[in-house]
Each structure stands twice: as structure tokens, then as C-alpha cells.
């Protein structure tokens, strides 16, 4: 739970919910599978070479979906406050909100948090903003 609390917008209650609902993290082969399981991916409709992204999936773990959306709402509420403006999740929120609107932006942040949760639990490391991750050598 302490690792999950390093994610932006995740506090005690959301960390408990996520930790209990995930179970064994090794059962998810990748971040796309986990974000789909947690309901933070949009429905995709493709026809005639055009792709339409719809609402978030309903056939998912509703508790995980709720937890990640609530964390996304925390980011949306605090994105302009000092200490939050330079965070990667705040930049995702602002970029998406300006193009698609508030609810889509919260969903984008929720998906980022779900994918990040998988990686921090898999690697057993604290969350770091992607901009602060040093480049790999070689």
C-alpha cells in the first residue's frame, strides 16, 4: 500500500481498495491488460478505416475503476495548485481537457495511474514522474 500511495491522487482509502482488488499483480502480463481489467480503457469501434473511441468499458472491475477515477478527480481538482503544476498527471489532464473536455481528461489520468500502478507494483519501486526518470545507459 505504501507504494500505491506514491501515485498522485492516491491516499489511504484508494490504496487499500486498489491493493485488495488487484490481488496478485503477476497475473497481468502488461499494463494494457491491467488497465482494461480496471476499466480505464475506452471502447473502440472501427469501420471503414475510421476508429472511434467511446466511453470507458463497463465490463471491468468496478472497484478499481472507481478508485482510479477518484484519483483522476483529485488530480483535476488540484492541477493548478503549487506543487501540482509540474506533475506529469497534471500535464496529461490539462492537455486532454483542452482538446476533449473534463470527463475525458479524468479518464486519461485514470488510465495513466492504472498503468503506473501495475509498473510500481511489478518493479516494487516508488512512482516517479516520467520526466524525472533518468535515461537508460546503453
Image (cartoon, rainbow, N blue to C red):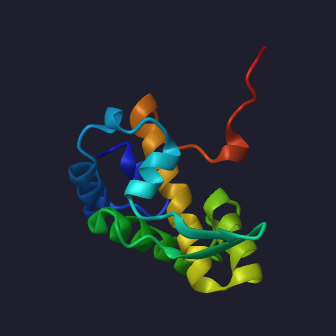
Q: Is 97 located above or below residue 42 in the figure?
A: below
Outermost residue, front side: 48
Q: Quadrant of residue 70?
A: bottom left
The residue lying toward the viewer, choosing from 127 and 82, is: 127
Q: Position of residue 66 (x, y in %)?
A: 34, 71
Residue 116 visible from this viewpoint: no
The residue lying toward the viewer, choosing from 41 and 67, is: 41
**Quadrant containing the C terminus in the rendered view:** top right
Q: Is 135 located above or below residue 69 in the figure?
A: above
Q: Quadrant of residue 11?
A: bottom left
Q: Residue at x 30, y 62 (%)?
A: 61
Q: Residue at x 70, y 61 (%)?
A: 86
The residue lying toward the viewer, choosing from 57 and 18, is: 57
32 left or right of 16 in image? right
Q: Quadrant of residue 136?
A: top right
110 left or right of 27 in image? right
Q: Residue at x 44, y 43 (%)?
A: 118
Q: Is 122 located above or below residue 131 in the figure?
A: above
Residue 119 visible from this viewpoint: yes
Q: Residue at x 50, y 44 (%)?
A: 31
Q: Position of residue 24 (x, y in %)?
A: 26, 37
Q: Position of residue 73 (x, y in %)?
A: 48, 77
The residue lying toward the viewer, choosing from 131 and 115, is: 115
Q: Position of residue 6 (x, y in %)?
A: 44, 49
- Tally the marks: 0
Amino acid at each position: 500500500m505504501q507504494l500505491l500511495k506514491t501515485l498522485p491522487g492516491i491516499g489511504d482509502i484508494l490504496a487499500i481498495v486498489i491493493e485488495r482488488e488487484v490481488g496478485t499483480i503477476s497475473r497481468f502480463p502488461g499494463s494494457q491488460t491491467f488497465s482494461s481489467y480496471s476499466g480505464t480503457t475506452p471502447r473502440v469501434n472501427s469501420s471503414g478505416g475510421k476508429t472511434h473511441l467511446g466511453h470507458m468499458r463497463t465490463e471491468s472491475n468496478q472497484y478499481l475503476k472507481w478508485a482510479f477515477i477518484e484519483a483522476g478527480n483529485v488530480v483535476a481538482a488540484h492541477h493548478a495548485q503549487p506543487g501540482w503544476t509540474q506533475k506529469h498527471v497534471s500535464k496529461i489532464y490539462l492537455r486532454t481537457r483542452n482538446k476533449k473536455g473534463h470527463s475525458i481528461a479524468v479518464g486519461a489520468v485514470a488510465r495513466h495511474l492504472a498503468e503506473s500502478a501495475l509498473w510500481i507494483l511489478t518493479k516494487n519501486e516508488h512512482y516517479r514522474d516520467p520526466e524525472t526518470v533518468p535515461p537508460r545507459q546503453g
